[in-house]
Image: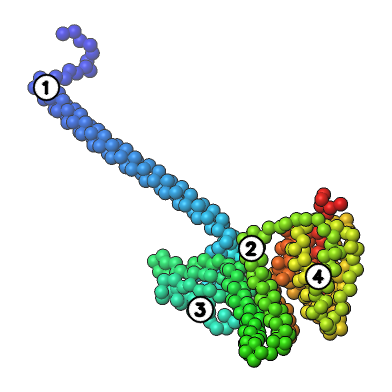
């Protein structure tokens, strides 16, 4: 053995010990590999569970987004529907009746903007009379107790004017009562129509009763005279009887004309004639019965016009009759006509009671009659001026009034020129 130095030492490991360590190392390595494999499988399972959880979370997020979009679309449709329902006022309020929602229809109907009313008590739309009577609270209590409250009453707009409303209030619940929603519709026009019908029935009954009662009385008198052979005394009664029959016929014609106008069936029979001659005919017929007033004509007889002669006679008769009716005893009525750039202009002047500015806007409406102290002084159904207005309009003309209380009135109408007019 060759020496490599004095300090070298040799170490010997028994063969058995070496083999044992190797086997132990291999066993430990195998265990580690098995543990790693098991851990990998466990991680795979966890990873798969995470993937599933992620997919589930993504599905939930997607469902949430879809639900949110559906809610947004639903809210948008509701908003569009609410804003489009301009004929209806949709109002929401809390349990203290403080307004929280105010639709476009509510703005148009009540004339308040949303900014003006939101945060304020809903009493703002009620009349002072209803507020004093506790109507707002009663409506809320009924909706709470019965599920809804329906009412028809007069409400007030921002400018203080009244209009008739048909409304329904319902409670709003979440976990508990949170407020109320009221849907209201302006029914003023329908209410006025109903009122007009009632007025018409009352006026027609009164106006028709007078000539019918007179006809009945005169007929009974004539029967008695004829049975007694006193035929000579019957002549004046026959004249009065004829006048009442004429009045009855006139009332019936007015009702028929009004019906035809409402149905759009008032036909015109156009012809050429002199307006001056027609005015003279009307004045002559009316002057006979007007013993307390005098009618003056200022019109050229040669002025031609192309129109429905009978309908224009109807207009003239109505205007002149009204002038005589409203003129005082001994008053003067003047009828004039002239040619203007627009057409033939006719005016009927009286020295009567006159009409206020407020009433002038209503004078050509159906069933219009004089109000106030003179209401019962001047009989009539209030259809004559309405019919006259529509007849002139059918001819393409216009009709209007100039008046002042206590200083008389002037009714004018203009009929346009026609190619057939010479």
Q: Is residue 216 left or right of residue 152?
A: right
Q: Secondary structure at mark 4?
A: helix
Q: Secondary structure at mark 1?
A: helix
Image location (x, y in percent) of residue 81: 52, 55
Mark 1 — residue? 19
Mark 4 or mark 3: name the one nearer the start of the chain. 3
Residue shown at the point (20%, 34%) measured from the top left: 38
Can residue 43 be seen from the camera position used here?
Answer: no
Mark 2 — residue? 260
Residue shown at the point (49%, 69%) measured from the top left: 168
Residue closer to the observer: 153 or 262: 262
Q: Residue placed farthest to the top in the image?
A: 2
Q: Is residue 81 left or right of residue 117?
A: left
Mark 4 — residue? 282
- How far is the residue under mark 3 from the one under mark 2? 48 Å
Q: Quadrant of residue 298?
A: bottom right
Mark 3 or mark 1: name the one nearer the start of the chain. 1
Residue shown at the point (69%, 73%) measured from the top left: 250
């Amino acid at each position: 053995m060759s020496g490599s130095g004095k300090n070298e030492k040799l170490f010997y490991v028994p063969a058995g010990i070496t083999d044992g360590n190797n086997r132990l190392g291999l066993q430990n390595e195998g265990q580690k590999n098995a543990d790693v494999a098991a851990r990998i499988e466990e991680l795979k399972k966890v990873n798969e569970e995470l993937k599933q959880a992620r997919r589930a979370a993504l599905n939930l997020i997607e469902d949430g987004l879809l639900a949110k979009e559906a809610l947004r679309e639903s809210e948008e449709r509701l908003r569009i529907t609410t804003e489009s329902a301009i004929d209806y006022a949709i109002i929401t309020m809390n349990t203290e009746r403080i307004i929280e929602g105010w639709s476009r229809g509510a703005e148009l109907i009540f004339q308040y903007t949303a900014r003006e009313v939101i945060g304020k008590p809903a009493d703002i739309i009620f009349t002072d009379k209803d507020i004093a009577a506790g109507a707002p609270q009663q409506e809320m209590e009924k909706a709470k107790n019965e599920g809804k409250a329906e009412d028809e009453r007069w409400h007030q707009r921002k400018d203080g004017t009244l209009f008739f409303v048909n409304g329904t209030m319902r409670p709003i619940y979440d976990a508990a009562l949170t407020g109320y929603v009221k849907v209201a519709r302006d029914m003023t026009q329908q209410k006025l129509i109903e009122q007009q019908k009632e007025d018409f029935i009352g006026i027609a009954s009164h106006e028709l009763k007078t000539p019918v009662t007179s006809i009945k009385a005169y007929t009974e008198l004539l029967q008695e005279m004829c049975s007694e052979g006193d035929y000579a005394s019957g002549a004046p009664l026959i004249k009065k009887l004829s006048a009442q029959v004429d009045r009855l016929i006139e009332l019936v014609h007015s009702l028929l004309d009004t019906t035809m106008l409402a149905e759009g069936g008032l036909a015109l029979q156009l012809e050429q004639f002199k307006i001056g001659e027609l005015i003279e005919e009307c004045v002559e017929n009316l002057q006979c019965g007007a013993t307390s007033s005098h009618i003056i004509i200022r019109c050229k007889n040669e002025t031609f016009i192309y129109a429905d002669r009978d309908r224009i006679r109807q207009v003239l008769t109505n205007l002149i009759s009204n002038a005589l009716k409203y003129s005082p005893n001994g008053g003067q009525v003047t009828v004039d006509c002239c040619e203007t750039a627009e057409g033939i202009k006719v005016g009927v002047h009286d020295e009567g009671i006159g009409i206020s500015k407020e009433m002038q806007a209503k004078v050509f409406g159906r069933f219009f009659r004089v109000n106030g102290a003179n209401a019962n002084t001047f009989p009539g159904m209030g259809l004559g001026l309405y019919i006259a207005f529509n007849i002139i309009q059918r001819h393409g003309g216009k009709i209007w009034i100039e008046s002042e209380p206590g200083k008389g009135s002037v009714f004018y109408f203009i009929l346009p020129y026609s190619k057939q007019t010479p």
